[in-house]
Image: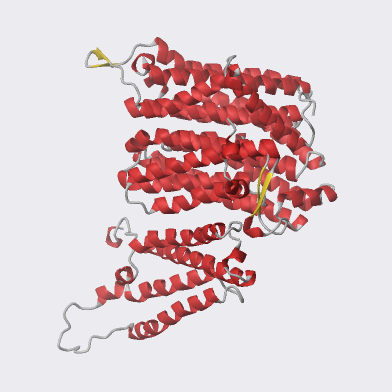
């Protein structure tokens, strides 16, 4: 947001190439953001074996969006990840989690007894954990972004000049 | 009618989890609903199912003993288990029934109180609150209690704040409640942490077993007990920790006030019983000291002081809110005496007071709905302008005082008898004084409503403008229920007294003296 204001509206002939002070940040961010998102998925899918899981993955995934917002501005981020997705994402995550439990009910087990999800109970445990953690990931990601959007979109009540 | 006979086999096995999962998932679905009518129908339908299953499960428990459910198939003490026993079943029925009653009332009330865009999220938050309260009561895992406590509390903060379209002061009250409620939850979870440190388990039954083996445990468990009592004290509005309550009750939407007044503090009281008598035990010296000096003492102080504060309120809702703090004092008094009879009386008063206060707040909400009344002075001539609403208010008010043939009388007499039998004969005097104070604050409202003429608008007296049927039915249901309990119509009193005696004998581990085993 801020850098957009500082950029002159019409470049004069003296400075033919308008200098962008953040060019390095932009290029590096464009390179890093997909990697961060990918790493989030790695953390999620390794959550059943190693350290990690849905919560951490969700935070990392949200961090990639937040980084995008920091570098390219809040408006660009809201185009990439519309605020209307937030409410849907939050509920979708809860429904994924609870839905896994309902599926285990339908398959005849106790609520969230993943053992019934596959022929081999230990495989079922894996699937169940991944499904449940996916729900956590979706909810945590959207909640983190919701918090960031909420604070980032706040307008100062009195402008700087009025002080 | 025994509903448990009609209950499908599946519900018997999975019932405890079903009570939590249904409102929780439906809350998520309701939150994205575009239509607000649809949200109301869904929520009402969900609460109806909850009432039926809670009643059926309670009847099943009555016939077959406690129902333990192992979440995810992991056996306790390592896994999380849910349990419906004699102590939790009546509270489950109470919470779901109050949810249904207030939902019927909510259709006209929310139209007036909540902005159209916020109605679907409002119902979602309400369902979430139900899920949290039911979860708190049904779980057997101490940390789960904290989680559900937070689920119900956080949705409650939202619900209270949604009253802001009626009165902006709701925002301040919700914030106040948020801060104090979070402190309470923090104290509670610190206590759980210490208890986990002492026992190495989170399962309540396992904790109880280990603490008994340790004969009360070291200083760590004493500290844990202290933190838990303070945390729960904040949640249940124990006298000096009640400052969040009047504001939250006064400015929340009517449905929320009625629901909170009859369930939220009651669920916290249930937890107090569960922790003090089930996990800890009055046999431990420190628990006994807290019961006698703190809970009993603060109960009496709260009874007197909160009732005195209620007398001097100009806002009718604040008056009833302070009266709630006073009534919590009665229950604490019964808990502090800690005999089977007194616990049973406290438990009975818990249920009776939920019904009475629910009815009173519903009636007050209808008065606001028709005439915008919140202050006691505005009650002038309400007996003529809203006779049915005022009738329900009067019956519930008598019940709050403890007039014979009402629910309040039954539980207050039981409380006084048990106090005298427990050696605290002088506490009977305090019960009497507090009841006289209740006569004053309820009587003040009734005097204005019955003996002063309706206000005049342009020289003509205010015309009769009764509340809509959807509001009258819930409040009269509460009023008639309190009469039914008081006069033992359809055996209502026997059912409630029986349920509280079973709960009390579960807590003290004895059979009730009167029933002879």
| Residue A162 visible | yes
| Residue B92 visible | no
Q: Split into 4 quadrants, where in the image is the C terminus of chain B?
A: top right
Asked if B128 appears above or below B248 in the picture, the reply is below
Q: Nearer the viewer, residue B298 or B361?
A: B361
**Residue B315 % position (x, y):** 43, 27
**Residue B280 % position (x, y):** 76, 44
Q: Split into 4 quadrants, where in the image is the N terminus of chain B?
A: top right
Left/right of residue A162 with respect to residue B13 in the rendered view: left
Asked if B84 appears above or below B505 in the picture, the reply is below
Q: Residue at x 72, y 28 (%)?
A: B342
Count of numbered circles on the image: 0
Q: Nearer the viewer, residue B491 or A58?
A: B491
Q: Quadrant of residue B58?
A: top right
Asked if B343 appears above or below B130 in the picture, the reply is above
Q: Nearer the viewer, residue B9 or B90?
A: B9
**Residue B65 % position (x, y):** 71, 40
Left/right of residue B358 with respect to residue B234 in the rendered view: left
Q: Quadrant of residue B417?
A: top right
Q: Residue at x 71, y 45 (%)?
A: B226
**Residue B277 % position (x, y):** 74, 40
What colour scheme was applied to this rendering of the protein? secondary structure
Q: Nearer the viewer, residue B320 or B390?
A: B390
Q: Residue at x 61, y 31 (%)?
A: B350
Q: Quadrant of residue B90?
A: top right
């Amino acid at each position: 947001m801020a850098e957009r204001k500082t950029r002159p509206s019409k470049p004069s002939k003296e400075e033919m190439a308008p200098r962008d002070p953040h060019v390095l940040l932009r290029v590096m961010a464009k390179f890093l953001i997909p990697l961060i998102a990918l790493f989030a998925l790695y953390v999620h899918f390794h959550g059943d074996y190693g350290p990690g899981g849905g919560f951490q993955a969700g935070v990392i995934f949200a961090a990639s969006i937040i980084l995008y917002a920091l570098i390219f501005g809040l408006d660009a981020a809201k185009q990439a990840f519309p605020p209307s997705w937030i409410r849907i994402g939050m509920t979708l995550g809860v429904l994924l989690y609870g839905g896994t439990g309902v599926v285990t009910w339908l398959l005849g087990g106790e609520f969230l007894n993943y053992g019934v999800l596959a022929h081999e109970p230990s495989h079922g445990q894996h699937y169940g954990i991944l499904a449940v953690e996916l729900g956590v990931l979706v909810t945590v990601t959207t909640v983190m972004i919701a918090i960031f959007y909420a604070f980032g979109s706040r307008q100062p009540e009195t402008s700087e000049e009025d002080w | 009618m025994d509903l448990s006979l009609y209950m499908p086999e599946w519900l018997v096995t999975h019932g405890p989890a079903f009570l939590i999962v249904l409102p929780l998932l439906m809350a998520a679905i309701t939150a994205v609903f575009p239509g607000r009518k649809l949200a109301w129908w869904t929520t009402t339908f969900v609460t109806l199912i909850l009432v039926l299953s809670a009643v059926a499960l309670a009847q099943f428990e009555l016939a077959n003993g406690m129902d333990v459910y192992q979440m995810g198939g992991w056996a306790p003490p390592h896994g999380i288990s849910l349990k419906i026993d004699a102590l939790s079943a009546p509270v489950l029925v109470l919470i779901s029934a109050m949810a249904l009653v207030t939902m019927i009332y909510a259709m006209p009330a929310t139209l007036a109180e909540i902005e159209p865009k916020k109605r679907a999220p409002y119902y979602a938050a309400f369902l979430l609150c139900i899920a949290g309260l039911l979860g708190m009561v049904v779980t057997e895992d101490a940390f789960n209690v904290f989680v559900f406590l937070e689920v119900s509390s956080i949705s409650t903060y939202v619900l209270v704040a949604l009253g802001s379209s009626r009165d902006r002061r709701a925002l301040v009250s919700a914030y106040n409640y948020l801060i104090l409620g979070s402190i309470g939850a923090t104290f509670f979870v610190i206590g759980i942490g210490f208890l986990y440190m002492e026992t190495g388990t989170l399962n309540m039954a396992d904790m109880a077993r280990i603490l008994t083996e340790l004969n009360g445990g070291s200083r760590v468990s004493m500290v844990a007990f202290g933190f838990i009592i303070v945390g729960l004290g904040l949640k249940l509005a124990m006298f000096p920790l009640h400052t969040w309550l009047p504001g939250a009750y006064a400015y929340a939407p009517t449905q929320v006030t009625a629901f909170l007044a009859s369930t939220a503090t009651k669920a916290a009281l249930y937890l107090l019983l569960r922790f003090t008598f089930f996990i800890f035990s009055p046999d431990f010296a420190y628990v006994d000291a807290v019961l006698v000096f703190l809970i009993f003492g603060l109960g009496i102080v709260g009874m007197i002081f909160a009732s005195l504060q209620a007398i001097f309120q100009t806002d009718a809702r604040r008056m009833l809110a302070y009266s709630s703090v006073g009534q919590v004092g009665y229950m604490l008094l019964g808990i502090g005496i800690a005999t089977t009879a007194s616990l049973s009386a406290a438990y009975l008063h818990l249920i009776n007071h939920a019904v009475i206060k629910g009815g009173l707040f519903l009636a007050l909400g209808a008065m606001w709905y028709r005439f915008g009344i919140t202050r006691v002075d505005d009650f002038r001539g309400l007996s003529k302008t809203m006779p049915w609403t005022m009738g329900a208010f009067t019956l519930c008010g008598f019940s709050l005082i403890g007039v014979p043939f009402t629910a309040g009388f039954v539980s207050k007499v039981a409380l006084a008898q048990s106090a005298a039998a427990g050696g605290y004969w002088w506490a009977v005097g305090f019960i009497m004084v507090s009841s006289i104070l209740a006569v004053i604050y309820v009587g003040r409202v009734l005097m204005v409503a019955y003996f002063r003429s309706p206000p005049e608008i342009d020289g003509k007296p205010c015309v009769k403008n009764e509340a809509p049927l959807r509001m009258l039915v819930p409040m009269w249901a509460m009023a008639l229920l309190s009469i039914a309990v008081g006069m033992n119509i359809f055996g209502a009193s026997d059912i409630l007294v029986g349920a509280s005696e079973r709960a009390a004998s579960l807590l003290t581990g004895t059979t009730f003296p009167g029933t002879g085993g």
